[in-house]
Image (spheres, grey):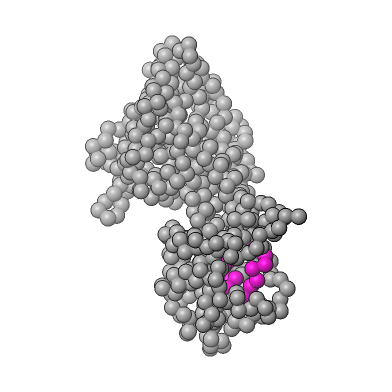
């Protein structure tokens, strides 16, 4: 049971809900009291004929149009219908689940003026896994994710389309049909409620949370793939010395250096060339792993803080604020603006794309006979007749190049909307959608590096890699055999990607290296 209070939802909660690891939800007692208090204010103001944006007026450029009391409910339903203007392929089921949860949590803060019934409908959809079909394109990221959230909210009222469970699969049906099948009453909107459901950043927040959850794992995975390349290319571990981290004390740099030492602990490959290695230092893609991977970790921490704040925020307009004297205030403002997320999600795309960029450079060294320090060209024992892993590096290069385009920031753009009333938009939804593809590309590039590094390590037998790199090597070999003769490389890449996309893979590797004593790897820096 996940209890919502509008203040304590975690990114892990969002990710777990998206995977259906959490399926029961409730509203805290304190939250329920706040929600009811703000709703009473809306009812009082409507009954008193007060002019309030989006409650007794039209929307956007129509804010100067007064709406008669008898048409206030119709106004809210019309809002959802008119704003359901999204296009493109539907958002993934995981994203829609996260959106439902995030919108419920935002309303649970008690600043939106909705009835508890509205939040209950959102949570009922989550519990039963009824997922509104939401087109992925159409949001400009200010006034919230209006079009995507309108499609979500419209389904709550029995209009639009819903994806429902059907045996071991799913099917898309009319919302009215879905609600009847599951014996759910359509939500009948009252004053403010349609607006409260669509003024928010929940699409970009949902995608951002799921991308961040994956990025945290990819940051660990990048160290693992790098440690395998480190072994196959017989690199030196001097670059991971704590001297560097003390001289330049970025948190991420220190974490990665220590992680690399743990992963390569007790490496027979490393120990075999400590005395007779003619190289003074390695190429940047090996020597600068702590600096590059570490900077990505620091970026992830920054974005995590932004998202953790956003998913526990009230993001609609106007805000309904109860006061101690009971009069309350309504504030028209811009908490729906997606700029904090737009900038952060662009930043995360840029950072994670660097994990792929430096990984591809290590893959190039693995397959390039002139750079691999003695490994056979393209990692095949039968070069010429067989091409080995030549084209795997092409694929990695293609994805890295694609990421360069996708990493161009969406947040630097703005197109005015609503007759220039909304004259600066964040484009945060565009940043979120691009980030999803970047993350997927990075995972594939890291899988390619692991595939190539595993092949490279095999050529160094009988020497064994380190504790963590060795565990990763065995995991890959358990699903992909040694490449003796050419075969469908795409199949091998897909198998390794399937392995590393499972969160338990990283957990197993970390379990192997958890007990490594850092003092046995490197002597500490002596203070002068």
Q: Quarter-wise, where is residue 179 in the image?
A: top left
Residue at left offset 64%, top offset 72%: 235
Quadrant that contains the C terminus = bottom right
Q: Height in image: 388 above or below 97? A: below
Frontmost residue, 194 versus 479 = 479
Count up the numbered dots.
Answer: 0
Residue drawn at the location 53% of the way across and 58% of the way down: 220
**What's the magenta bit mostly, secondary-structure-wise?**
helix
Q: Nearer the viewer, residue 94 or 75?
A: 94
Q: Is residue 22 magenta?
A: no
Quarter of the image where the N terminus is located: top left
Across and down, in percent, residue 24 comes to 32, 40
Q: Is residue 450 visible?
A: no
Question: Which residue occupies the foreground of this view, 504 or 159?
Answer: 504
Q: Is residue 233 above or below residue 165?
A: below
Of the pair 25 and 474, the residue shown nearer to us: 474
Residue 6 shown left or right of residue 277 in the figure? left
Q: Residue 227 magenta-drawn? A: yes
Residue 381 point in image, percent of width and height: 53, 86
Magenta residue span: 226-240
Give x and y (percent) for residue 414: 63, 41
Residue 116 in view, yes or no: yes
Q: Residue at x 46, y 22 (%)?
A: 55
Query: Which residue of the protein is positioned furthest toward the right in this rendering?
Result: 528
Question: Residue at coordinates 57% horizontally, 26% vertically from top-left?
Answer: 333
């Amino acid at each position: 049971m996940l209890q919502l209070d509008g203040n304590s939802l975690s990114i892990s909660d969002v990710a777990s809900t998206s995977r259906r690891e959490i399926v029961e939800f409730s509203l805290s007692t304190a939250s329920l009291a706040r929600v009811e208090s703000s709703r009473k204010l809306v009812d009082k103001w409507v009954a008193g004929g007060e002019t309030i944006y989006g409650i007794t007026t039209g929307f956007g450029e129509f804010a100067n149009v007064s709406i008669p009391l008898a048409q206030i409910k119709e106004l809210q339903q019309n809002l959802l219908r008119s704003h359901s203007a999204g296009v493109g392929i539907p958002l993934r089921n995981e994203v829609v689940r996260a959106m439902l949860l995030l919108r419920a949590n935002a309303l649970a803060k008690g600043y939106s003026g909705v009835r508890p019934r509205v939040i209950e409908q959102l949570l009922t959809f989550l519990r039963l896994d009824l997922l509104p079909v939401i087109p992925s394109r159409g949001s400009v990221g200010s006034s919230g994710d209006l079009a995507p959230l309108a499609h979500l909210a419209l389904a709550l009222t029995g209009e639009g389309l819903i994806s429902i469970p059907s045996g071991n699969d799913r099917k898309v049906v009319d919302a009215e049909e879905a609600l009847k099948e599951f014996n759910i009453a359509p939500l009948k909107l009252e004053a403010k409620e349609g607006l409260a459901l669509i003024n928010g950043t929940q699409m970009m927040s949902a995608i951002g949370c799921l991308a961040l959850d994956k990025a945290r794992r990819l940051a660990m995975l990048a160290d693992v793939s790098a440690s395998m390349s480190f072994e196959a290319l017989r690199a030196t571990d001097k670059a991971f010395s704590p001297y560097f981290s003390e001289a330049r004390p970025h948190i991420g740099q220190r974490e990665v250096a220590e992680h690399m030492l743990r992963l390569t602990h007790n490496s027979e490959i490393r120990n075999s060339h400590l005395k007779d290695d003619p190289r003074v230092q390695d190429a940047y893609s090996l020597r600068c792993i702590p600096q590059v991977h570490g900077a990505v970790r620091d970026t992830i921490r920054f974005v995590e803080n932004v998202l953790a704040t956003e998913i526990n925020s009230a993001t609609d307009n106007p805000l309904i604020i109860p006061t101690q004297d009971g009069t309350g205030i309504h504030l028209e403002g811009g908490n729906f603006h997606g700029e904090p997320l737009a900038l952060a999600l662009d930043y995360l795309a840029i950072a994670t794309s660097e994990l792929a960029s430096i990984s591809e450079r290590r893959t190039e060294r693995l397959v390039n006979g002139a750079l691999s320090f003695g490994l056979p060209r393209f990692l095949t024992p039968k070069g010429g007749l067989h091409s080995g892993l030549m084209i795997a590096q092409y694929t990695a290069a293609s994805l890295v190049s694609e990421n360069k385009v996708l990493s161009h920031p969406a947040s630097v753009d703005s197109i005015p909307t609503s007759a220039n009333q909304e004259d600066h938009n964040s484009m945060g939804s565009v940043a979120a959608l691009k980030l999803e593809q970047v993350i997927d590309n990075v995972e594939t590039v890291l899988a390619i590096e692991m595939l190539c590094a595993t092949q490279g390590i095999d050529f160094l037998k009988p020497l064994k890699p380190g504790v963590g790199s060795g565990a990763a090597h065995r995991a890959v070999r358990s699903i992909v055999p040694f490449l003796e003769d050419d075969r469908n490389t795409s199949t091998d890449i897909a198998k390794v990607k399937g392995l590393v996309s499972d969160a338990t893979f990283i957990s197993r590797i970390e379990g192997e290296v958890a007990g490594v004593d850092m003092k046995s790897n490197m002597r500490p820096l002596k203070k002068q």
